[in-house]
Image: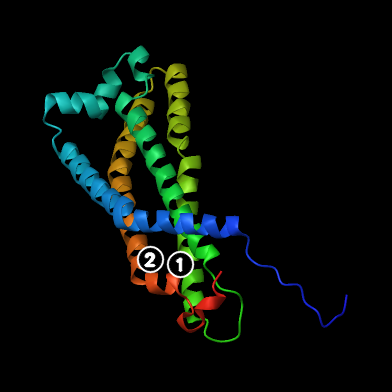
Amino acid sequence: MSKNNSTVIKMDEQVLKYKEDLYDKTVHHLKVTIPKKIAEYQELAKSYGQNSENEQDGQTSKKRKLDSEDYVLMPIEDLIKTNRVIMETHQKFKKAYIELIEIFSVIRGWISLNIPRIEDGNNFGVDVQEDIITQITKLEEVYTSLLDGSENYFASRASLIKKILKHKDIEAYRYSLAQVDEKEFTRFSFSYFDLANNYATTYSLIVKNFAKLETPRPTNASNIY
């Protein structure tokens, strides 16, 4: 083959179709899914905070959490049981984190496929694409890490339970267990706020720069793959 000849490889139709599918999903997420998620987690953060303030309500208090003194008086067989509300909320957050990762991985995939071929000059739009891909990747890593670390609470609680069973006369371990559970309830409230905030800030970044993401080189649109 002559050195002057170059092989021309066109983008496969299946890849182009896949890119179009990601684009359609991205638009749907930006118009429908993400705004709904922001509203949902804003309301959950607000209602969870209000529930925390209503500790004088006997039923709410009994359902959600107990005072430290209750841990001291509680029978061992009840103490070793994980709070049902904490278990259920952990499952809800696990689902929420997976949803967030899935939603933004779709958007990141479309942006990545929409990056034009490398050329000298006129790369501002490409820089925007790469910056937003970086931001989305960092967000996905945060929530992947949270998924991986969700077992930390249960491991800490199990460790304290072992100490309580071994040293039944040391009340400090029971107080520590109460603090572990209390900390987890407090974290839930902030986690709902963080979900709403991370959805909103990333959504805002994408929408404000959507024109550049969609057409990074408006004067050379034919080069976009």
In what element is the residue under mark 1?
A: helix
Residue 132's disc number? 1
Q: Indicate the quadrant containing the C terminus: top left, top right, bottom left or bottom right.
A: bottom right
Residue 2's disc number? none
Residue visible at 44% across and 43% down in the picture: 98
* 116 displayed left or right of 107: right
Nearer-the-camera pick, 57 or 172 = 57
Residue 57 is drawn in which quadrant?
top left
Q: Looking at the picture, does residue 197 appear above or below residue 97? A: below
Residue 220 locus on image (x, y percent): 52, 82
* 129 displayed left or right of 203: right
Residue visible at 27% across and 44% down in the picture: 189
In what element is the residue under mark 2?
A: helix
Report if the CB atoms under discs 2 and 1 are less than 8 Å apart.
yes
Q: Indicate the quadrant containing the N terminus: top left, top right, bottom left or bottom right.
A: bottom right
Q: Looking at the picture, does residue 29 appear above or below residue 115? A: above
Residue 74 is drawn in which quadrant?
top left
Residue 94 locus on image (x, y percent): 41, 38
Residue type at mark 2 is Ile
Residue 118 locus on image (x, y percent): 61, 77
Q: Looking at the picture, does residue 77 appear above or below residue 187? A: above
Identity of the residue furthest to the bottom in this view? 121
Q: Is residue 186 visible?
A: yes
Q: Which residue is mark 2?
A: 206
Q: Is residue 139 visible?
A: no
Residue visible at 30% across and 57% down in the picture: 31
Q: How far apart are the two marked residues, 2 and 1, measured between alpha carbons?
A: 7 Å
* 185 displayed left or right of 126: left
Residue 8 locus on image (x, y percent): 72, 72
Residue type at mark 1 is Ile
